Amino acid sequence: MPLGCAVQGGPPYPDAARPKREIPAELRAAPLDPARVRVAPEARTVEPSWILQLYTALHRRDYATFRVELPAEPGEDADAIAHLLVPPGPGPHPALVVFPILAGTHVVSEALAKGLVRRGYLVLRMERRAFPFEEARHPDELARELAAAVRGGRRAIDWLVTRPDVDPSRLGSAGISMGGLLACLLHASDPRTRAAFVALTGGGIGELLYDTRERPVRGFRDRLIEAHGLGDRAAFLAWAKPHVRQLDPLDYAGLIDPAHVFMASGRFDRVVPAARSDALWQALGRPSRLVLPTGHYQALPFLWHVTGRAADHFDRVLVPGDGAGASAGAAQPADHRE
């Protein structure tokens, strides 16, 4: 374990203190017709990144890769784009849906997918739905985009479970930053998923909108403050939180077994402040959590290590009937400090 990292875990959170709620209509996806999904072979590395090219060159390359187009839901005008990584062998394999970060390239989510397929997981990596923070004028717009992304993940699972190389009893979700928030929501809203890895993310979307140092989000926040005359943080939260609450992972934490979640956080994160990560960790029942001695973007050098720990978690939770993990690596105990 790198110096300064710690894995936290604790006793189960008291059930009486954990919120319970039904899944709202916003997260209920329209049924997907698997026959309409388009699949075509593609290169093993999609994003133009020397880091990904080097990783592909240094590690085994006997997995197959495909571009996947999932038909749009009724009322949507664009199909969802994803990338499928299939490990060698006939399967059936455990399968994971991986979500992207908020903005920029898809290098981080592709790196996460590459690390997980190398450990024996079939991975469907979702591309980002474009959200124009520079033009948005209301938090309802953000809530709609988040809900659509989660529904896209549920429809992706509709397709995955029809594949003969997928074990429908061993499904999970994963993501970093905004992708971690979406992975948490997918795990909470779709009972077919049994495990989740959420990194550098947190709960309390209203608080995140106000407190984050992420520049596009702060611009969005400042326009909301000016347009609606919100004088201080308390006024902003009182106005904004009702608009985003339906997509706040804090409200769904009571639907998740903490033993099925693994978190990673940055101790000095200012994009997702530590208070937001801690709030989600507490609400989820204090699951096993790796705390990195970094900020948000400074966590990148730890990416491969964190991905390995995520795979250990999936090995531990998504155990097949014969008792063997998805990969040969032995899982570490959940509660320890290094």
Image (spheres, helix red, strand yellow):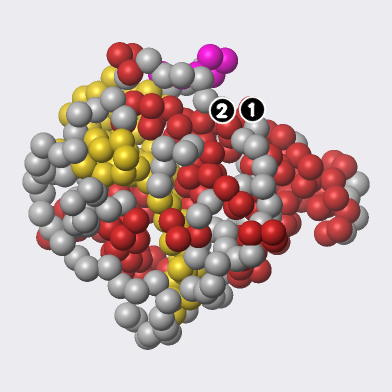
Estimate the x, y position of residue 161 in percent, counting from the top left.
31, 30
Q: What element carries label 1?
A: helix
The residue indicated by pointer 1 is: 25
On the picture, is 136 further left or further right than 44? Answer: right
Q: Which residue is found at the position 85% from the left and 41% from the top? A: 227
Q: Which residue is found at the position 72% from the left and 57% from the top? A: 207
On the picture, is 59 further left or further right than 139? Answer: left
Estimate the x, y position of residue 38 in percent, counting from the top left.
29, 19
- Asked if the residue at tag 1 contacts the one at tag 2, i.e. Cβ–Cβ closer than 8 Å, the answer is yes
Q: Which residue is found at the position 38% from the left and 23% from the top? A: 70
Which quarter of the picture shows residue 88? top left
Q: How far apart are marks 2 and 1 (CA)?
A: 5 Å
Estimate the x, y position of residue 220 in percent, counting from the top left.
70, 46
Which image quarter holds the N terminus? bottom left
| Amino acid on which disc 2 is placed | Arg
Query: Magenta includes 210?
Result: no
Estimate the x, y position of residue 254 in percent, counting from the top left.
61, 52
Would you place residue 88 above or below residue 268 in this image?
above
Q: Which of 220 and 149 is in front in this view?
A: 149
Which quarter of the picture shows residue 270? bottom right
The residue indicated by pointer 2 is: 28
Q: Tell me if mark 2 has few (under 14), some (14-19) or many (20+) residues whose alpha carbon lies within 10 angstroms of its own.
A: some
Q: Is mark 2 on a helix, strand or loop?
A: loop
On the picture, is 18 further left or further right than 138? Answer: left
Count of labels shown? 2
| Amino acid on which disc 1 is placed | Ala
Q: Give the range drawn in magenta.
A: 71-76
Would you place residue 314 above or below residue 27 in this image?
below
Residue 184 in view (yes/no):
yes
Which image quarter holds the C terminus? bottom left
